[in-house]
Image (cartoon, rainbow, N blue to C red):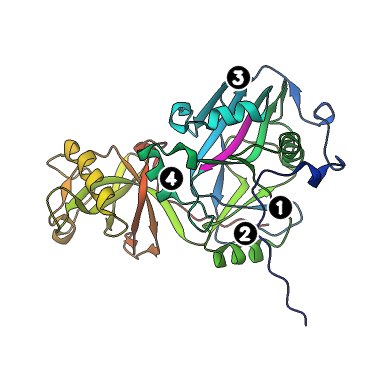
Amino acid sequence: MRKAAPVKRPRSVPLKASALKSGRGLVSPSKIEGAVKSAMPSFVEPCLATLVAKPPIGEEWVHEIKFDGYRIQARIDRNDVRLLTRNGLDWTDRFGGLAKALAEFHRGKAIIDGELVVEDANGHSSFSALAAALKSGRSEKFVLHCFDLLYLDGLNLIGATLRDRKRLLEKLFVRRAKAGPIRYSGHLAVDGARMLSDACSLGLEGIISKRIDRPYRSGRHDDWLKSKCIQVDEFVIVGYLVSSAGPNAVGALVVGYYDKKRLIYAGRVGTGYTHRTAADLMRRLRPLHVDAPPVQGPLTNLQRRDVVWVRPDLVAQIEYRAWTGDGLLRHAAFKGLREDKPAKDVRRPITKVIET
């Protein structure tokens, strides 16, 4: 029995015009079912993927690489370009020349859904590298991976299928091949389990599976599903421990999450800090000091020991192996601060079982 060939990683680069010079397979905007003429929305609430234990099965599903960065909605109104976070915050000024690159990429009007990343030496998106680039102002490192098109030159595409939206998006890259940091995020119509396995072997975070026949729906739905190689999620910082190396650096973070309005203790995060990040965290957390733990529920003496409690204002991205039986993070490591998500929105991730 022949062994199946490994799934190749989808390309996520500016396409060359020669790759699709015939234009076959591309669709005219005026012929797209579900597209309607309208003024350009100021913001479209993003579609969010539901976490599942394994990728779905079926020909209606396609799969993309999961990036580790900031979800960004690029709103192009000719020369006026705005880069909006998943909550609609305008971060255009933080991303340097990316807005200029988008204005050159498309001269008309468009809303593009994508992920802003910084890549490591292996070409993988790295949230730690992104956080460092944002802090240092190294805007030349930013890359925007574009995976959806919601509006184009007078047509609202939210009601169109993902198949048609991505064909139109791909067509934009054919017309504007030299887009620099603006890249098309491809997809594969292959076995999702095999693609996830290959993504994990490449050291990637996971994959996103999407229904190719569905319109764009805001909020968290089952049309988009995410399967992870490693667990990476957001947690609220509720306290810290001072580093044994000195009083001006953090040695560990204490984190939690919200269950409705209750802030729940989730454990300590003792690794993942450089000297610079440990000192920066101390500068940010010191003014937030409070006397009592902000979490609800009883804490053991060990959980309280040496902790400096803080107001739960900051959100950290944490990589971890698993949850313990008593609801604490196992083998947790700090990846960076998330500035695009309010602390009140942080919930414990729930893996959903989807019948496909």
User: Residue placed at 63% from the left, 36% from the top?
Assistant: 217
For marks 2 and 3, give the CA distance. Answer: 40 Å
For marks 4 and 3, give the CA distance. Answer: 26 Å
Residue 23 vs 330, above or below: the answer is: above
Q: Position of residue 308 (x, y in %)?
A: 15, 48
Secondary structure found at label 1: strand
Of residues 229 and 122, the one nearer the viewer is 122
Q: Earlier in the sequence, mark 3 or mark 1?
A: 1
The residue that label 4 is drawn on is 130
Secondary structure found at label 4: helix
Residue type for callout 2: Pro
Of residues 338 and 159, the one nearer the viewer is 338
Question: What is the number of the mark on residue 93?
Answer: none
The residue that label 2 is drawn on is 55
Residue type for callout 4: Leu
The residue that label 1 is drawn on is 61
Residue type for callout 3: Asn
The answer to the question of whether label 4 and label 2 lie on touching residues, with beta carbons closer than 8 A, is no
Residue type for callout 1: Trp
Left or right: 70, with 326 as reference point: right
For marks 4 and 2, give the CA distance. Answer: 27 Å
Left or right: 267, with 348 as reference point: left
The answer to the question of whether label 1 and label 2 lie on touching residues, with beta carbons closer than 8 A, is yes
- Residue 142 visible to an observer of this rendering: yes
For marks 3 and 1, give the CA distance. Answer: 36 Å
- Quarter of the figure with residue 94: top left
